[in-house]
Amino acid sequence: MTERTSGARQLAAAWADLVATARRTAAEGLVVGTSGNVSVRVGELVLITPSGVPYHRLGPDDTVAVDLEGRQVVGTLKPTSELPLHLAAYRATPAAAVVHTHALHATAVSTLVPELPPVHYMAADLGGPVRVAPYALFGTPELAEGMLRALRGRTACLLQNHGAVSYGDTLDQAYDRTAQLEWMCRLWLTAHAVPGHTPSVLSPVELAAAGEQLRGYGQGR
Ligand SMILES: [Zn+2]
């Protein structure tokens, strides 16, 4: 197999994974319509969902790839307007895949607090209490900069009055973190809504211990 065909196969496989992940965000209720976006890094290229195309309509011929400066390398469909946010994540973090959604509970929490109180130990899997980046217009460098500050030492953050972003080593990991974050936001909102009570939160020591435990989890124990 020539280098060229193996590269093309790698891109095609990554695009199929990306489309499957994007469809999952819609099927599992994390986005409505096309109100989210998904990307994955393949070497020096970033494959990313196009702007305004419903995920069920995306096929193998709709591949969109840009370089790390955002120049389109593959495809004719326009990349999502949140491209700057995805590129910032690839430039400044170890992200290999990024999932952005307007998930309901995550977005609700983003309007209430500057940080999601650590009501569950799964916060440790995201690096600690999840911060909220200050509001900025979608698609702008300001939003991307605020996101990077909120992501420091974390693999996910909320965007005020907008949604959530998470990243991972794979599309599956980025997706799972998005789903976990949405669940934790729902958990906090549920507990917080009980009149006359304030939810208890975990201490930094408790979260650090959970983080240690999670690092050993899933390896045959
Ligand atoms: Zn958005």
Image (cartoon, rainbow, N blue to C red):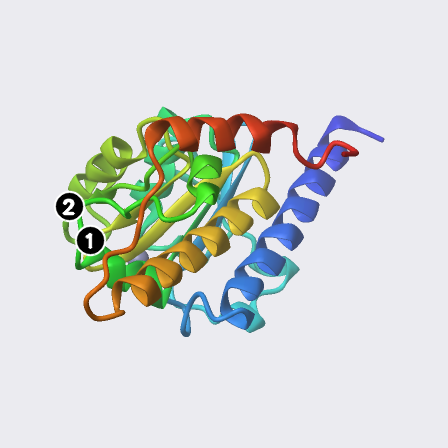
**Residue 25 drawn at (x, y percent):** 51, 63
At x 33%, y 58%, the residue is 188
Label 2 neighbourhood size at 10 Å, few (<14), some (14-19), many (20+)?
Answer: many
At x 28%, y 46%, the residue is 117
Q: Amino acid at mark 1?
A: Gln
Can I make out residue 204 in this image? yes
Q: Relative to the observer, which residue lies in front, 103 or 112?
A: 112
At x 23%, y 57%, the residue is 198
Q: Which residue is mark 1?
A: 160
**Residue 121 drawn at (x, y percent):** 46, 42
Locate the C terminus by quadrant: top right
Question: Residue 114, relative to residue 20: is it above or below?
Answer: above
Q: Quadrant of ligand 1?
A: bottom left
Horizontally, residue 27 falls left or right of residue 66, namely right
Image quadrant of residue 215? Answer: top right
Looking at the rendered structure, the secondary structure element under dot 2 is loop
Question: Residue 47, relative to residue 61: is it above or below?
Answer: above
At x 19%, y 46%, the residue is 140
**Residue 71 drawn at (x, y percent):** 38, 38
Find out whether the residues at labels 2 and 1 contact each other: C-beta distance under 8 Å. Answer: yes
Looking at the rendered structure, the secondary structure element under dot 1 is loop
Question: Residue 66, relative to residue 188: is it above or below?
Answer: above
Q: Residue furthest front?
A: 196
Q: Amino acid at mark 2?
A: Pro
Between the C-alphas of marks 2 and 1, the distance is: 5 Å
Locate the N terminus by quadrant: top right
Q: Earlier in the sequence, mark 2 or mark 1?
A: 2
Horizontally, residue 88 falls left or right of residue 9, namely left
The label number, if any, that marks residue 134 in the structure image: 2
